[in-house]
Amino acid sequence: MRTAEIRRRWLDFFAQRDHTVVPSASLISPDPSTLFTIAGMVPFIPYMLGQQAAPWPRATSVQKCVRTQDIEEVGKTTRHGTFFQMNGNFSFGDYFKEGAITYAWELVTGAQADGCYGFDPDKVWVTVYHDDTEAAQLWKRIAGLPDERIQGRGKKDNYWHTGQPGPAGPCSEIYIDRGPAHGPDGGPVVDEDRFLEIWNLVFMQYAIDEVRAKDEFRIAGELSQKNIDTGMGLERVAYLLQGVDNLYEIDEVFPVITAAQELSGKRYGADHVDDVRMRVVADHVRSSLMLIADGISPSNEGRGYVLRRLLRRTVRAMRLLGVEDLALPSLLPVSRDAMGVSYPEVLTDFDRISRLAYAEEEAFRRTLVAGTTILDTAVAQVKRSGGSHAAGRPGLLAARHLRLPDRADLGDGVRAGAAGRRARLPRPDGCPAGARARRREVQEGRPSHRRGVP
C-alpha cells in the first residue's frame, strides 16, 4: 500500500465519522519557543489548553513535522528521520477513551477492502498507564485482547504533558509484532524493535502543576473538558504495510536512494557504511524539499541554519560515496516526484525550491575548495614541524581549523573531501563557537534555551 494511499485512508476514515479534515499546518511552528512543528497536535495546542474554543468538536489531520534532535541517528536506525508525517484524530470535549480505542481498533485491524489497514489482530499489542484500569478493560471489551498483550507502564512511557502546568493524561500505545526475526518475545516492555509502536492515544483528562520532570508532577484535578489527542507515524505504518525493513525504503523515500546508487556506482545493501550514507541523503533531500516548500531559505541562523545543515550533510554524504559532481540536480527532482502526490505544492513551486537548493550546493562547493586549501596548509605545516602526522601537536592543526569560515558542517565537509589523502590525523573540534551553539539549537529543535513542546 503506497504511502499516499495510507494517508488518504486515514483522512477518509475519520471524515466518514464526523471529523473535520484540517489541512497540515506549516512546518514553521506557531510556538516561538520551537523552530518547527514537531508533532501533529501542535496546531491544536490552544484548544487543548482551553485558550481558545475549538471550531469543531472532532478533527483529523496529517501533519508535516520536522525534528532534528536525533539527526546523528538518521540512517543508522529503522525509524529515525528528520521529516515525518503524523496522522492525528482529535476530540475536544466530545468522545473520550471508548471512542478513541474503538476507532483505533477498527482502522488498524479492519479489512483493506473496507478502507482500513488490515493488520493481523493477533499481532497487535498495547500498553496503558499502569493505573489506567479503564483503558485496559476497554481494550479487552472492544478488541478482545488477552491480558498478556496489554502491558502497563509508568509515567515516563505512558503519561503525556507539555512539560508545563496544564492539561495532561495517561496514554495508550499500539504496537505491531514484527516477528521473531526482529527480536525477542515478550511485548514492547521487552523489545521495541520487534514490537514497533505505530499509534499513541492520549487521554487528556487532568490538570497538573508543580512539574519537575516528565514523571514528576502533581495532579491538581480533573479537566472540565476531556480531550483526545492521537498520533500515528505514517512512515512507520508505510514500511510495515510495504514489507520493507525501515522508513528509508518506503515509496516516498527509496527513489532517492536509487538515484544515489546510480550517481555513485555503489549498490545499496552491499556495504553498511555506504547504506547509512545513502539513507542520510534520502532523508535529508526530502526534508530540505519540504522545508523550502514552506518558505524557509538557507542561512546561518535559526530554521535557515537547519536547512543549510541538511543540504550540506547531503553533499558531504555524496562526496563520501565518491560523487564529486553536483548531486542535488539529480536527487531533488526525484524527491519532488515522490512527494508531489500528497503535496502538489512541491510540483508547482519547484523552480523556486530548486534554485535555492542548487545555489546552496554551489556555494558549499566553493567553500569546500577554500577550506580544503586552509586544511592542506595546516597539515603541511604540522608535518614539517612534527613528523608524518599531528600526534602531540593538535593545537596547531586546531588553530588553523578555526580559521575556516563559520558555515554549517564545513569542517566535516572538508574532512570528507580530504579523506583518503591524509590518514590518522586527529579530528579536532574545528567548529567555531557560534556554529557549535547553533548546532546545539538544531539538535534540541529550538531557537534558544526556552523549552518547547516535547
Image (cartoon, grey):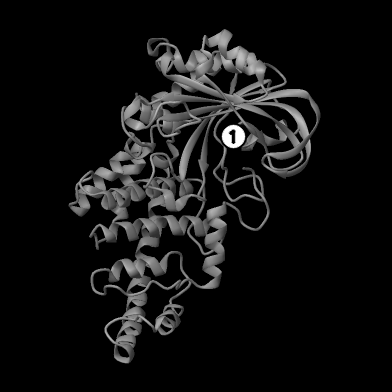
Screen quadrant of the N terminus:
top left
> In terms of image quadrants, where is residue 301?
bottom right
The extreme left residue here reads: 265
Residue pointed to by mark 1: 157
Q: Residue at x 42, y 19 (%)?
A: 123
Residue kind at label 1, given as amino acid type:
Asp
Query: Can residue 434 be seen in the rendering of this structure?
Result: yes
Query: Can residue 53 be seen in the rendering of this structure?
Result: no
Q: Residue at x 29, y 68 (%)?
A: 417
Q: Is residue 406 left or right of residue 136?
A: left
Q: Position of residue 250 (x, y in %)?
A: 34, 34
Q: Residues within 10 Å of mark 1 (few under 14, many from 20)?
A: some
Q: Position of residue 23 (x, y in %)?
A: 55, 31
Q: Is residue 446 left or right of residue 190?
A: right
Compared with 447, 237 (above or below) is: above
Screen quadrant of the C terminus:
top right
Q: Is residue 121 left or right of residue 56?
A: left
| Front one among 286 and 194 | 194
Q: How many marks?
A: 1
Q: Secondary structure at mark 1?
A: helix
> In terms of image quadrants, where is residue 110?
top left
